[in-house]
């Protein structure tokens, strides 16, 4: 449900950038969404389409760059890849993991006219 | 960020009063029409036919007047839009989607730190016993610590009324169709609530184990409440929330004799997503764990006070 708020956040970022950098039309938007971020990609696509209607980003292409989840295992003292927050360490099975990446939600770049 | 889910903008209410941002407030309608008002002025636009979006912090007088089928982006840089320049170019942005919310959250956090206020964001699914636990907490803290409450619900001020009946001050935020509180709503509630210096501020979020996890309100800790009438596996079904929390209250423990609930299993699941999570077993009915919970609050408040003293010296 909060993907609607997130989509509105994306539009806000785009509009702020439009004002600062002087463009009036956006044709593509790259979002970096971590695999461990609380975002459902299909849902944000749907919401992005809805909130950009009538805006400078109407009809723009949404590209999602998925970043893998990574964590530091305190038992192995090693960086490991995880698919979900409740995953154990793939090496030792411990849950003593500190998430180090894959929780980002960023507007990376825009293609503008 | 004046965001509500499902395009329910303009439905946020703080104690029944329509919530308006003094910096301008925009409403997005289902047909994509956006209109905005600022400084409390009513401003009507035709239902469709034009789109007009104020950029953050702008009021009407800095915007070009909306006409016909035009899109207006203010009189700033967008006004320098060069006709005929159709070549696409790439613009690096690298900005957090939640950046706006996080800015408001940082401002709330700064206010809490300056005044030694311990803010706790209480999150759970609906029906976990948050409000009952909160009422009991206030009664037990009565006279020991000053406490104020921000209540978040989609509709009604029932919860704020329950809190006020205990003697504590409370402000109700109705999110309309929104599924979570955001830092901007809480900032507004703080203006009318004005918590005392060195007090506890309890923010009871909308009952929802999903969305409130993503929105920082400026709190010191999220406290997740899981009741034993829910499944043991909720922490791994809704891992974002349990990951974001600093304390879990396993609530309604007085009901355990009547249930086949495995407490250890629930705690184990919670620590899979958040290995450092502290857990207190509580019951507002029997009083179990309440002393430990109150001690945790008092220790948090003392730590917040020390931070305040250090900030004053620095």
Image (cartoon, coloured by chain):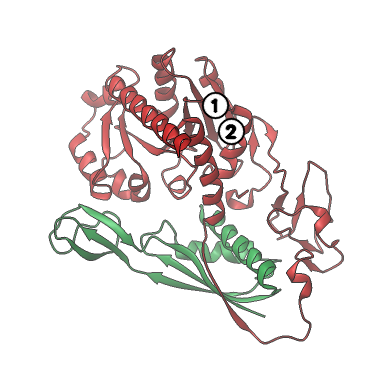
Does residue B200 appear left or right of residue A22 in this picture?
left
Question: Image height check: is A54 above or below A23?
Answer: above
Instruction: Give how far across and how far down residue B215 sits, in percent.
Output: 48, 48
Q: Residue, x 53% and y 26% (percent of image)?
A: B159
Colour for chain B in the figure: red
- Give the quadrant of the C terminus of chain B: top left
Q: Residue at x 42, y 56 (%)?
A: A38
Q: Are marks 2 and 1 in contact (CB under 8 Å)?
A: yes
In front here: B42 or B110? B110
Is residue B119 visible in the rendered image? The answer is: no
Front in this rendered view, residue A79 or A67 = A79
Which residue in the protein does label 2 denote?
Answer: B190
- On the image, the x and y values in percent for residue A96 come to 20, 52
Estimate the spatial distance between the alpha carbons at disc 2 and disc 1, rounded to whole Å: 7 Å
> Can residue B238 be seen?
yes
Q: Colour of chain A?
A: green
Q: Is residue B90 above or below residue B116?
A: below
- The crowd level at tag 2 (other Cα within 10 Å; few <14, some 14-19, many 20+) is some
Q: Chain of mark 1?
A: B
B194 with respect to B207 (left or right): right
Residue B9 position, x and y percent, is 66, 48
Mark 1 neighbour density, 10 Å: few (under 14) some (14–19) many (20 or more): many
Query: Which secondary structure, mark 2?
Result: helix
Percent coordinates x, y for residue B238 in the rendering: 35, 48
**Res. A37 mark:** none
Q: Which residue is mark 1?
A: B195
Residue at the (21%, 32%) spot, across then down: B260
Quadrant of residue A12 within the rendered picture: bottom right
């Amino acid at each position: 449900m909060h993907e609607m708020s997130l989509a509105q956040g994306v539009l806000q970022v785009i509009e702020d950038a439009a004002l600062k950098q002087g463009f009036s039309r956006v044709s593509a938007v790259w979002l970096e969404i971590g695999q461990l971020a609380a975002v459902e990609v299909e849902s944000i696509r749907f919401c992005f389409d809805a909130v950009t209607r009538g805006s400078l980003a109407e009809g723009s292409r949404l590209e999602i760059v998925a970043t893998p989840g990574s964590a530091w295992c305190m038992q192995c003292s090693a960086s490991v890849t995880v698919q979900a927050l409740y995953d154990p360490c793939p090496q030792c099975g411990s849950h003593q993991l500190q998430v180090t990446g894959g929780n980002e939600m960023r507007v990376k770049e825009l293609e503008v006219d | 960020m004046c965001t509500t889910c499902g395009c329910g903008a303009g439905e946020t209410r703080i104690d029944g009063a329509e919530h308006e941002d003094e910096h301008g407030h925009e409403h997005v309608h289902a047909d994509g029409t956006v209109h905005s008002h600022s400084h409390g002025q009513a401003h009507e636009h035709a239902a469709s036919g034009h789109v007009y979006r104020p950029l953050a912090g702008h009021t009407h007088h800095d915007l070009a007047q909306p006409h016909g089928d035009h899109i207006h982006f203010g009189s700033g840089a967008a006004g320098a839009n060069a006709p005929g320049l159709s070549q696409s170019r790439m613009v690096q942005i690298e900005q957090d989607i939640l950046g706006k919310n996080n800015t408001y959250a940082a401002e709330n956090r700064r206010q809490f730190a300056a005044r030694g206020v311990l803010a706790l964001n209480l999150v759970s699914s609906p029906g976990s016993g948050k409000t009952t636990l909160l009422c009991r907490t206030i009664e037990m803290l009565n006279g020991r610590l000053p406490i104020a409450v921000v209540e978040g619900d989609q509709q009604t001020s029932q919860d704020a009324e329950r809190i006020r009946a205990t003697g504590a001050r409370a402000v109700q935020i109705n999110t309309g169709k929104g599924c979570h509180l955001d830092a901007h709503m809480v900032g507004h509630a703080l203006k009318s609530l004005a918590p005392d210096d060195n007090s506890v501020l309890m923010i009871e979020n909308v009952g929802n184990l999903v969305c409130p996890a993503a929105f920082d309100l400026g709190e010191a800790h999220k406290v997740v409440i899981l009741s034993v009438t829910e499944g043991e596996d909720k922490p791994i079904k809704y891992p974002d929330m349990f990951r974001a929390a600093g304390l879990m209250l396993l609530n309604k423990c007085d009901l355990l004799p009547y249930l086949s609930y495995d407490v250890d299993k629930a705690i184990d699941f919670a620590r899979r997503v958040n290995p450092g999570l502290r857990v207190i077993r509580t019951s507002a009915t029997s009083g179990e764990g309440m002393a430990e919970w109150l001690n945790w609050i008092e220790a948090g408040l003392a730590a917040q006070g020390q931070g305040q003293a250090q900030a004053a010296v620095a």
